[in-house]
Amino acid sequence: MARPLRIEFPGALYHVMSRGNDRGPIVRDDRDREKRLDWLRRTVETYGWRLHAFVLMRNHDHLFLETPEPNLSAGMQYLNGSYTSYFNRRHRRSGHLFQGRFKGHLIEEDGYFLEASRYIHLNPVRAKLAARPEDYRWSSYPGYVRASRAVPWMTYARVLGEFGRTTTTARRAYAQFVRGGVDDPPPSPFAGAVGGLLVGSERFVTRMRALLRDRPDDDALPQLAPLRPRPALEKIIETVASHFGHQPSPWQPGRVRACTHQSFQAAEFIAIPCVAAAPLDGVFAKSHITMKRSSQKRRCQIPFSARRRRLAEIAPSPIRPTNARGTRVLICLHRVV
């Protein structure tokens, strides 16, 4: 069974969402809402989290938090497991309350604090549960704009610190910033998450990919494949040319539609089914396979014969990005002769 990829390290910043099973409610009344927030408080205090924002909706909730210790999964198991036990006891039900494991985005600290907190606080407005975010009781926003509504287990200083030197000035400026999103709704800062997980600059994504370099392959982690560090195409060409005993200079990228019977007669050709899953080590670890066996036979359009066994399965060779599901792509290289 597939499970979400988790990257945990001290000081990591996350957007976390827990959704009800089959999109069903996770709270039925205010008593449930109060209990959910009470278990959130306990989790923050037990695991030492720094909670920057939250919103509790009918069938899901959002958290924006920082983990001084690498304990996101442990904390979420404690939070959702404890609350599920309460909910099932109170409502005399059994089974799962939440839809699988929680969904999480790993966020770069610089440049994303403000947009992430505003997106979370605008959830009730987008869902038409409130005309203004301050009218919705079950979020951290009231504590941002009114000192009397602040709770001790929330961390307000990091976000407010971006808006002014004094707390009063910062609260007023933050409220104006969030209200601007009511009139002109901003796009989700998580929509372009790399691999459905990483939200940040290219430098941040590169650093996170480096953390995954030595993680073992796991078929249950489909998000891992597209986040592997990918070697440059030049490195692939060098390896392919070396395998065939040629210099890399005559080799160049080709196109699938050029892989016809006629073009094959004029050039030595290799089509590489590329799996964005593993490093370049062990390239050509699998033996050559015939065109008949290859799943890429129809795409290459090269008639099968014993003389044309140039199709190589290079399972460890990511060459260019694939989508978040790790879809195979075809890279063609040919040597001009």
Image (tube, grey):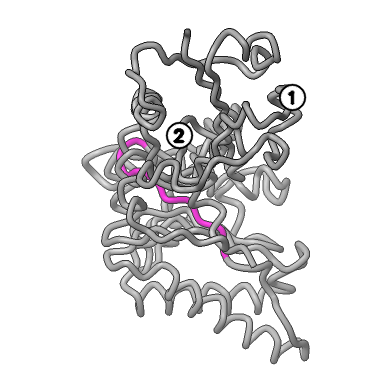
Q: Circle 1 — which element?
A: loop
Residue 281 pos. (x, y %): 35, 45
Who comes first in sequence, dot 1 or dot 2? Answer: 2
Residue 279 pos. (x, y %): 38, 45
Where does the N terminus fall, quadrant-wise?
bottom right
Query: Disc 1 vs disc 2: Cβ atoms closer than 8 Å?
Result: no
Give the crowd class for mark 2: few <14, some 14-19, many >=20 residues within 10 Å: some
- Picture residue at 32% right of the left edge, 18% below the top: 247
Relative to residue 84, is residue 11 depicted above or below? above
Real-space Cα distance between discs 1 and 2?
Answer: 63 Å
121 magenta-colored? no
Residue positioned most to the front: 306
Q: In terms of depth relative to the viewer, which is nearer, 7 or 139?
A: 7
Relative to residue 305, is residue 50 depicted above or below? below
Is residue 232 shown left or right of residue 188? Answer: left
Relative to residue 245, is residue 62 depicted above or below? below
Q: Amino acid at mark 1?
A: Pro
Which of pointers 1 and 2 indicates the residue nearer the eye?
1
105 magenta-colored? yes
Task: State which region is magenta.
Answer: 102-111
- Picture residue at 51% right of the left edge, 17% below the top: 334
Q: Circle 2 — which element?
A: helix
Name the quadrant containing residue 163.
Answer: top left
Q: In terms of depth relative to the viewer, which is nearer, 275 or 247?
A: 247
Q: Say which mark, if any, is on residue 303.
A: 1
Q: Amino acid at mark 2?
A: Phe
Residue 91 pos. (x, y %): 76, 87
Q: In terms of depth relative to the viewer, which is nearer, 98 or 174?
A: 98
Which residue is disc 2 drawn over?
A: 177
Q: Say which mark, if any, is on residue 70.
A: none
